[in-house]
Amino acid sequence: MLPYKLQKFQATNFRNLMPDVIEFGPNINCILGENGNGKTNILEAIFVLANKKSFRKNTSFPQYLGIDGEKPEIILSSVFEVESEIVSYSAKIEEKQSQFFLEGKPAKKKPEIKLVFINPFDSYGFHNIPSHRRTWFDQHISLLDKDYKKALNKYTSALRSRNVLLSKKPPAFREQIKAFDVELAANSVYLTEKRVAFIKEMAPFTNGIFKKIFAEEHQLEIEISSQVVGLDQNQIFELLQNNLEKDEVRCVTSYGVHKDDYVLLFNGLNSFDYCSLGQQKMSYLSLLFAYIELFRYKFMAYPIVLIDDVSGELDKFRWKKLVEFLEHSEFQVLITTANEKFKEELEQIQNAKKIYVESGRIS
Ligand SMILES: Nc1ncnc2c1ncn2[C@@H]1O[C@H](COP(=O)(O)OP(=O)(O)OP(=O)(O)O)[C@@H](O)[C@H]1O
Ligand SMILES: [Mg+2]
């Protein structure tokens, strides 16, 4: 199967973007321009079309609707290459509803546009904030496995309901909590199996990825730290029930897969404690590119890779290596930068398409 590729894109009424048609090349596309001109907005609009939501946190329609627009609606239009077919796909997005169109006709089933978004600023959150790590793993496993996403939604909804009952305190809700605990236990086993399997599947790809991108001999491995690995459904149910009194005092569920954490090992050492900022960023990028290889292995096709300004904390040697790596990759890349030096590096790539953005206009 061929990689997913974006050929054309146009956004109307999306943030500061003008409705110019952007044509992309099949390999590397460098989106260049000074701060605040609309580079990230282009990536965000593409992401919204593919995922019906933004990658920016706590951001939805009111934030990304263009403030100067005449109508409160956003139109995103695209031409994609999906599974070697050319597909025209667009969306009309309003505050309360969205409509999707395939080849100009309302779409019953929207085509799956597989994107991986890399925001290197997330390296900090990934290394320092456990909830960011959990979200990273959940999002990336979900992209590979729809059943994981369904089970995760069920788990999260049962957990939320259990916590609401806990906050009401009286033991009158214990029977209802018991029912939620059955659901939580079943989904905990399933989610844990999937998480462990994901880490195992990533291993061949994380192994050697650092060398492939940055020409350095560092080993990357992922470990899961979980209260429930190896436990069966009954044991997890017992744990939840045994902790009920304690949970009632604290009004929160203290056991379960929502407490899982992950450790990124850099040469066997915890990258959060051990690595410099640059090494953390290299490790984070390496993890993402290993994931992209796993994605290809699973779907027999590469996703489209969106990379928003990667240059901070990396020195010139590492940029060069990263650019070389991207140059030799088969996937389509849309990469932005405002950094003059990194821009010079990107501009030297032969076969790359350069897209200049100024005040939301494309040139
Ligand atoms: N709803 C909106 N309507 C119109 N303009 C908006 C809206 N939201 C944000 N903007 C504008 O979008 C611009 C920011 O765009 P973006 O984040 O894409 O910049 P950038 O080129 O990626 O810059 P940087 O290099 O600093 O990351 C700002 O000028 C901001 O005022
Ligand atoms: Mg930006």
Image (cartoon, helix red, strand yellow):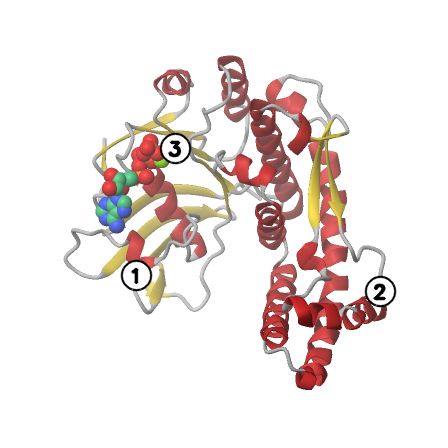
Residue 116, image x, y percentages: 51, 43
Q: Residue 92 carries which label?
A: 1
Residue closest to the eye, 327 or 54 = 54
| Residue labelled with disc 2 | 232
Q: Is mark 3 on a helix, strand or loop?
A: loop
Spatial CA distance of label 1 from label 3 is 25 Å
Residue closest to the eye, 81 or 259 = 259
Residues packed near mark 2 inside 10 Å, few (<14), some (14 to 19) or many (20 plus):
some
Residue 71, image x, y percentages: 17, 61
Amino acid type of the residue tagged 3 in the rendering: Gly
Amino acid type of the residue tagged 2 in the rendering: Asp
Closer to the observer: label 1 or label 3? 1
Tag 3 or tag 2, which sits nearer the N-term?
3
Q: Is mark 2 on a helix, strand or loop?
A: loop
Spatial CA distance of label 2 from label 3 is 50 Å
**Which residue of the protein is positioned furthest toward the top in this rendering?**
317
Q: Which residue is drawn at 57% across and 46% down?
A: 132
Q: Residue at x 39, y 65 (%)?
A: 107
Residue 35 horizontal side relative to residue 210, left or right: left
Residue 63 image-quadrant placement: bottom left
Residues packed near mark 1 inside 10 Å, few (<14), some (14 to 19) or many (20 plus):
some
| Residue labelled with disc 3 | 25
Residue 121 horizontal side relative to residue 76, left or right: right
